[in-house]
Image: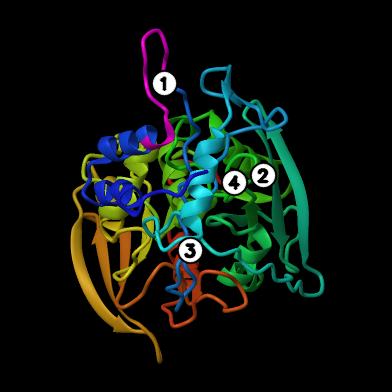
Amino acid sequence: MKPIPPGVMRAAPRLTQAGRLTEATAALQDLLGIQQGPGRKSARRPSPTIDGVAEAVGTAEARPAPHVGSRSNTDGGRRRFDRAEGTIQPAMPAALRDFLDQIGTSEFQLPDGLASPSPIQPSVAVPKGAQFLTATFSNHAGSRSYKLYVPSGYCAGQAVPLFVMLHGCTQSPDDFAVGTRMNEAAEEHTCLVAYPAQTSAANPQKCWNWFNEADQQRDAGEPSLIAGITGAVMRDYSVDPRRIYVAGLSAGGAAAAIMGHTYPDLFAAIGVHSGLACGAARDMPSAFAAMQRGNDGLAHAATSRRIVPVIVFHGDRDSTVNLRNAEAVVTQAAQGARLRARTEEGQSPGGHAYRRTLHADTDGQTIVEQWTVRGAGHAWFGGSPAGSYTDPRGPDATGEMLRFFLEHPHPMAAPAA
């Protein structure tokens, strides 16, 4: 591939930063020779990975460009199956791959959040009597493996809470379990924890595809797989149907918001850490825009049969997912409800200061809880440094989420027998 002139290399990101996303896409298409001609349709290219997790705490080095790949299996690298249309589409043009490889080794940098360093893969310590099991769930949308933590205090026949934890890009269930310390919290409070695993076949950076319209629907795509894993755990273990919750980080946080919107009958409450609201994006250009600037005109309104309680964490120095996305999660969750807000200021011991805003209903119950952590970036607050993308300086997001969840049983689910 011929060297790319610096002016051309800077054009697309400059247009993207200015919000001129159509022109940015056109600039790349022109550069790569992907254009329309008489009797010829534009070559369709798979969307780049929208990586919702960026640098680890304290890292500010240049990162490689994102991988670009298909949503499903390839045929020798030549073709891909488009699930939404059910047709065989051309694979990514070699020129596009060469372009991304070249800019990844130059001084050119894509916007924060599009690529990240490979995380560590720590081993998970399992206390005596507990289990950390591996299983697989499959349905019409595909197949996903998951890990399940069963605490030592679990007894069949005793209904316990279930937490579904959705990792961020490049992470794994083991890494996420170690980083969040959720297994330790579940051991203390006798809860089950399921960790669905995204595959590199579905997304090259193992991000949940929160920005695809096909993965924002009930009984379809990734929401059906996550709900299916939840149902499989409920089938095989004694789970209290009033106390089932879902939470995630970044791309996983965005997926958790989608699960709260699409399955309000299943999940009693949700946790969104450094994520985005349901419907914040419907494709690659709008995903870039939402991550950089937030999205005030969400495609999905809060039309659920019930207001799903949500706890939100976000750093005010997050350069990967704009803080305005936390506001959008709160606005979406509270839509249609008459809530009163009060704000508290606090300080983590030896760590970050924070602002905690409680949105309560007319009975005084907090429905939406928002934590804005001052001086903090894109990482799980209060997490273990043994995991990736954690900020041990607090506040304790895991403990606060667990506390919030257990305060909000599902009002409609039947109690455990």
**Camera-nearest label, 3 or 2:** 3
Amino acid under disc 4: Pro
The residue labelled by disc 1 is 42
The residue labelled by disc 2 is 234
Q: Is residue 37 magenta?
A: yes
**Camera-nearest label, 4 or 2:** 4
Image quadrant where one finds the C terminus: top right
The residue labelled by disc 3 is 63
**What colour scheme governs how the chains and residues are painted in the rendered image of this protein?**
rainbow
Q: Nearer the viewer, residue 340 or 76?
A: 76
Image check: 255 left or right of 311? Answer: right
Residue at left 32%, top 40%?
A: 286
Q: Secondary structure at mark 2?
A: helix
Quarter of the image where one finds residue 325: bottom left
Q: Secondary structure at mark 4?
A: loop
Q: Earlier in the sequence, mark 3 or mark 4?
A: 3
Quarter of the image where one finds residue 365: bottom left
Residue at left 24%, top 44%?
A: 335
Residue at left 43%, top 80%?
A: 394
Q: Earlier in the sequence, mark 1 or mark 2?
A: 1
Marks 1/2: CA–CA distance: 46 Å
